[in-house]
Amino acid sequence: MTTPATTDDRRRIDWLLTIAVVAVAATFIRAIFFTPAEARQGLAQKIFYVHAPSAFIGLYVAFGIVAIAGALYLWLRDERLDRVAASAAEVGVIYMTVVLITGPMWGKPIWGTWWTWDARLTLTLFLWFVFLGYLILRGAIEDHDTRARYSAVLGVLGALLVPFIHLSVYLFRTLHPMPIVLKPGHPSLPNSMLATFAMSFVSFTLLFVALLRARYRLAERVDALVAEEELEPSPMPNLRAEPIR
Amino acid sequence: MSNRTPVPPGTFAAAVLIARKDLAIEFRTRSAFLAAIVFSLLAIVIFFFAWDATAVSAVDLAPGVLWVIFTFSGLLGLHRSFGVEEADRAIDALLASPVDREAVFLGKALANLFFVLGVQALAIPAVAIFYNLPLGRVLAPLVGIAVLAAIGLVSIGTLFSAMAANTRLAELLLPVLALPFFVPIILPAAQSTARLLSGRPIAEAMSWLRILIAFDIVFLVACALAFPFTLED
């Protein structure tokens, strides 16, 4: 912020992000102070208001965007699609990390174990790995088009992988029953909890959209900078000429 | 791509040619295959001492050992698949030749399949000897599982090897990308191997094998279709 030369765009407050952060903070306050504790699980159940919306957004929304934007990129070759996919992957990995951190925190007091190789947990873990691989892949490629194509391919294949991981870990679990693990199931929530849950859902989605937009704008700026650099004549001749025929 | 030669080979003929080229390179240098074999033997030994053999019976241990070895020795061969093409930009000549991109993928995958099957052909007897497994009666279905799993490993591995070879991380990236995709291969393969070795009928492993077969079909097609996108236009 010390360089006054940059455009005033940088100084402008991201209102969407501000609203989203306030909404998430309000959700926390409501969940902690104004929502009754669950009878059997006690305070631990309050993790639900962070865990469930993060899981939905990280697993379905972010992963879906990466896969669909990837497939569309391979078809249309529009670099905006690549930026959307990259942004969704980066924000999605944060949401999934939140899921994987809050999950064991909730599991330990309620299930009595940090981790169980339940189908959904395993699927989440492996999709997290795919996402991390996606980001590492992007970081390892400099060429703009190559990076976009490779990550699009990985995003599409990742979507194909989901049913297979789900099937195989589900079969693994059912053939090897775990020791008695108390599953919370899906109890019908009382109204006050349902309201908090709906609020958490909306605020986490809003935060996702705001972060996605902010990350997209950053990608746009980086791309613009790279394009500017590429306009300057290269001091080296192009060494990778056409192959001699 | 211009067709200078009068009769360019068909997709499968071209694939076989490319596979023969890769296998010839491998046969003359033997570097990756030997490394994979030695790695497998070392892994067998290390796994044996990593578990308490008096607490875990060899029959319970062996399926896991086999499939961990196949996964990692497969990776050893796979990342060389496109690594060899990087030297002198041999890949450019390959792409300039009048063959389909799909043929390049199939040829590379075929050579990798032979590589993985070769490692398996030596590692399975080695595990049988060291872990004292009654292999005779389960050999045929075990070979079937090994071939099915190898097809899946090689489809994914060939595609990601092509991608990894073009990145700054090169061979470091391949396991990071490929291993999550190997889960629906290793899990069914190890589970059905375990059923076989503990004397259960193959029918009990059918639901696992169905996943494996479906995976092979879906990912062989998907990777062959995705492969042209990984090459520079």
Image (spheres, coloured by chain):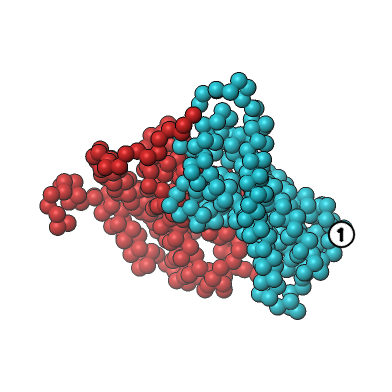
Q: Secondary structure at mark 1?
A: helix
Look at 44% across and 69% down and name the residue there: A37
Q: Chain of mark 1?
A: B
Give the percent coordinates (x, y) of residue A67: 48, 43
Foreground pick, B3 / B208: B3
Q: Is residue B179 above or below residue A108?
A: above
Foreground pick, A185 / A156: A156
- Res B14 → quadrant: top right
Foreground pick, A223 / A44: A223
Q: Is residue B132 above or below residue B14?
A: below
Look at 33% across and 58% down and name the residue there: A24
Chain (cyan): B
Q: Type of residue at label 1?
A: Gly
Chain (red): A
Residue for badge 1: B136
- Res B221 → quadrant: top right
Look at 73% across and 60% down and name the residue there: B123
Foreground pick, B27 / A183: B27
B209 relative position to A27: left or right: right
